[in-house]
Image (cartoon, grey):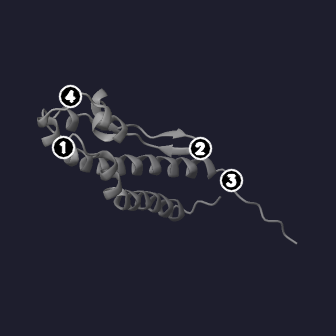
C-alpha cells in the first residue's frame, strides 16, 4: 500500500495570506462603522466627529480585533448611560446637539451585518486565491 505524503511547506504562506485578508477586512469593516458613527456623533464643534478613528488590527484574547472609537476624553459622557446621568451642568446646547444619547453602539448595531459581509468577502477572496494557486496543505 502506497503511503501518501502531505505537503505542508505552503501552510505558513497560506496562513499569512488569510491573516492579511482578515486584517484588511477588519479595517474595511471598521471604516464602514466609523462612517456611520461620525454621522450619529453629537456635533457642536465637530471635534467628536473628527476624533472617531479605526485602529490597527491586533490580537486580543485569541481573537483578532480592531478598535473603533473617539479619541476625545469626554466621549464617554455622550455614550455610556452611567456617565450621562453623572455629567454635571450639561447645558441646553449639549442636549440639543444630542449629547444625551449613545451614538457609537447604535452605529455598530446598524452596520454589523455589512461589516460581517465585508469580512466574509475578504476571507472568501483569500481562500479562492489559495485554492486557485494549486496550493496544498
Q: Answer yes or no: do the residues labelled 4 and 1 have beta carbons within 8 Å?
A: no
Decide which of 29, 44 is in the foreground and name it: 44
- Label 2 to label 4: alpha-carbon separation: 42 Å
Q: Viewer-nearest of labels 1 and 3?
A: 1
At mark 4, the secondary structure is loop
In the image, is residue 29 above or below residue 4? above
In the image, is residue 123 above or below residue 95? below
Question: Which of the 4 image quadrants contains residue 42?
Answer: top left
> Mark 4 or mark 1: which comes first in sequence?
4
Check disc 2: other Cα within 10 Å, few if <14, some if 14-19, many if 20+. Answer: few
Q: Answer yes or no: do the residues labelled 1 and 3 have beta carbons within 8 Å?
A: no
- Label 1 to label 2: alpha-carbon separation: 37 Å
Q: Viewer-nearest of labels 1 and 2?
A: 1
Check disc 4: other Cα within 10 Å, few if <14, some if 14-19, many if 20+. Answer: few
Q: Answer yes or no: do the residues labelled 3 and 4 have beta carbons within 8 Å?
A: no
> Mark 3 or mark 4: which comes first in sequence?
3
Check disc 1: other Cα within 10 Å, few if <14, some if 14-19, many if 20+. Answer: some
The residue indicated by pointer 2 is: 62
Q: Viewer-nearest of labels 3 and 4?
A: 4
Q: Quadrant of the C terminus?
A: bottom right
| Residue at 37 percent of width and 62 percent of height | 113
> Mark 1 or mark 2: which comes first in sequence?
2
Amino acid at each position: 500500500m502506497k503511503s501518501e505524503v502531505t505537503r505542508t511547506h505552503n501552510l505558513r504562506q497560506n496562513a499569512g495570506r488569510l491573516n492579511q485578508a482578515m486584517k484588511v477586512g477588519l479595517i474595511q469593516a471598521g471604516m464602514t462603522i466609523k462612517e456611520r458613527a461620525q454621522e450619529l456623533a453629537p456635533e457642536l464643534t465637530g471635534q467628536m466627529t473628527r476624533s472617531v478613528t479605526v485602529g490597527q488590527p491586533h490580537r486580543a484574547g485569541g481573537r483578532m480585533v480592531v478598535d473603533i472609537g473617539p479619541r476625545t476624553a469626554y466621549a464617554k459622557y455622550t455614550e455610556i448611560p452611567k456617565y450621562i446621568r453623572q455629567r454635571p451642568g450639561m447645558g441646553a446646547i449639549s442636549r440639543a446637539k444630542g449629547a444625551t444619547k449613545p451614538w457609537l453602539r447604535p452605529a455598530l448595531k446598524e452596520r454589523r451585518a455589512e461589516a460581517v459581509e465585508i469580512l466574509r468577502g475578504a476571507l472568501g477572496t483569500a481562500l479562492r486565491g489559495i485554492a486557485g494557486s494549486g496550493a496544498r496543505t
